[in-house]
Image (cartoon, coloured by chain):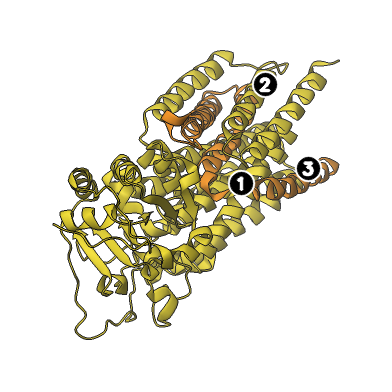
Amino acid sequence: MSASAAIGVAYLVASLTFIIGLRMLSSPVTANRGNRVAAAGMTIALIATLLTPGLANYGLIAAGIIVGGAIGAGSARKVRMTAMPQMVAIFNGMGGGAAALVSSLEFVHRTSGGGTLQTGQAFTIALGAAIGSVSFAGSLIAFAKLQEIMKGNALQFQWTKIASGLLVVAVLALVVVITLGTDTIPVLIALLAVAVILGLVLVIPIGGADMPVVISLMNSLTGLAAALTGFVLNNELLIVAGALVGASGTLLTRLMARAMNRPLSNVLFGSFGATVTGGGELPAGATVREISVDDAAVLMSYSQRVVIVPGYGLAVAQAQHQVRELADILSSRGVQVKYAIHPVAGRMPGHMNVLLAEADVPYSEVYEMDAINGEFPSTDVVLVVGANDITNPAARSDPSSPIYGMPILNVDEAQHIIVLKRSMRPGFAGIDNPLYYNPRTAMLFGDAKDSLQKLVAAAKTVAMPRERRTRSGEPEVVQR
Amino acid sequence: MTEILLGAYVFILAIVVGFEVIGRVPSMLHTPLMSGTNAIHGVVLVGGILVLGQAHTITTQIIGLAAVLLGSLNVFGGFVVTDRMLKMFHARPRDQR
C-alpha cells in the first residue's frame, strides 16, 4: 500500500470515530467513552498527517503542537465549570482562526510564483477564510462578554444593523471578486479584515442572555470553515468533521432560538433587552413579600415535593455545591427533590446540567422543561435560584411582553415559590417579572451562595416530628 | 471540478449523518456535545500541519505556525475539557455506586 493510500485509510478511520463518538454521546452512560473514541481517531489522523511524504518544517510543527497542546490542555484542566461557556467560546475562536489561516496560506502557496487559482478553489478558499475570520472575531467577543472583560449587556445601536448588513455585502462581494479571478494578496487581506470586523459588529450588540444562541452559531460557523478548508486541501476528513460540527451547531442554534421563541434574525439584530417598551404592566398595589431564612427552611423541610430551578445566577454565585447540600438535607428528611432545567438557562446549551453534575447531582433527578412542567401544580415549594426570565409568567399571559410566547417553566403553578435573588433588578431581558408579585411567591434577597449556606444551616436545625405527615399528605402545621 | 463534486458528496452525506446522530443527544449533554464537536473541528490542525509543512518563506512559516498553534489549542483543550465534564455525569449519587 502506498503511503498516501495508508494515510487515506487512517483519515477514513478517523472520520468513522468522529461519527461513532458523537453517536455515543446520545447517552450519559457511553458519552465519556465516545469522547475518547473521537480523541483516539484524532490521534490517528494527526500521526498519519505527520507521516505525509514531503513535509518540511517538522521543528516548527512540533513546536506549534507542543506549545498549543500544553496551553490548551492546561487551561482545560484548570477551568471552572461555571466558566465553561467562555472556554468553549475561545476554543471555538481558535478553530475558526486556524481555518482562516489555513485557507489564507493555501491561497498564498497557490498564487505565489505567478500561479492562479481555479474558480472552484478560489471560491472555497475565499469563503473558508471569510467564515473562519467571522467565527474567530465573533467568538473572541463572546469570550470577552462571558468573561466580563466586556460589558455583557445588550446594546442597541441602529448603526450596527446597517453596518452588519453592509459588511455582509462587502464580504460576499470580495468572495465573488476572488472567485472571478482577482486572486491577489491585498484582496485576500481586505477580505480577512472585513470578515473580522463583521464578526465583531455582529456579536458586540448581543447581550449575555442570548449567548447560548451565539455560541451555537459560532460553533456551526467554525465547522463550516473547517469543512471548506477540506475542500481547499482535497481532504475528506476535514470535510466530514466540519460537516458534523456544522450540523451540530445548526441544530443547537435552532433549538436555542426556538426555546426563546425568537427567530435567529431577531437574536442577531433584535438586541433583546436593549429596547424595553412597556409590557408586563403590574397590577396596581402589587407588593413583594419577603421571607426569612428560617421560615424558608421550615417551609421546605415540611414539604413533600420541592423543585429547584437553577439559572445563570447560580453559576455566577458558584452555588451549585450549596444547592446540592440543601437538597441532600431535604432528601434525608423525606422530601422529594427534583431539578428543573430550562433549555436556555445559563450561557450555553446544557450549562446547568454540567454545573449540577459537578456538584454530584445524579442526572436522574434533573428534568427538562417539558418533563417537569406538568408537575408544578402538585409541587409544594419551588426554589428559584438565580433564574428570572425563564420563570416569567408574562411569557404566557401578556401579549405585550417582549418575551410573550417563549416557553417557560410554570413555577407559578406551585403551592409556594421561593425566589433567591440579589435584588429586585430585572433580569437580562430587562423585563419585570410578575412572578415576584404573586401572593404565593416569597423573596429571599441576597447572594445565592450566601443565602443557600444560611438555608442549609437553618434546615439542619429544623425540628422534625417523628410522624411528620398527616394521612392526607398535607404538610403539618409548623409549631415553633 | 470532479474533486469539488466528490467533496460536495462527502459534505452533504456527512451533514445528513450529523443531523441524524446529533438529534439523538439529550439536552442534558448539550454542553459536552458542544465542547466535543469543538474538539472535532480542531481537526483543522491537520490542515495546519499540511500547509506549514509546505511553507518556505518566513511569512508563510509564521502564518502556518499560528495555524498549528491555534488548531492544537482547539484539539487538546476541547477533548480534555469534554473528558472532564463527562466524567462528572452519574446516574446515582457517589456513595450509592
Q: Which residue is mark 2?
A: A44
Task: Give the number of the mark in front: 2 or 1.
Answer: 1
Task: Give the number of the mark in front: 2 or 3.
Answer: 2
Evaluate if marks 1 and 3 touch, with contact meaning CB atoms under 8 Å apart.
no
Question: Mark 2 belongs to which amino acid?
Answer: Ile
SS class, disc 2:
helix
Q: Which residue is mark 1?
A: B25
Q: Residues within 10 Å of mark 1 (few under 14, many from 20)?
A: many
Q: Residue at x 64, y 27 (%)?
A: A37
As displayed, is residue B17 above or below residue A255? Answer: above
- Judged from this view, the residue extending furthest toward the left is A480
Residue A298 screen position, x and y as percent: 22, 55
Q: Residues within 10 Å of mark 2 (few under 14, many from 20)?
A: some
Closer to the chain start, of discs 1 and 3, is: 3
Task: Give the number of the mark in front: 1 or 3.
Answer: 1
Q: Residue at x 31, y 68 (%)?
A: A430
Question: Mark 1 belongs to which amino acid?
Answer: Val
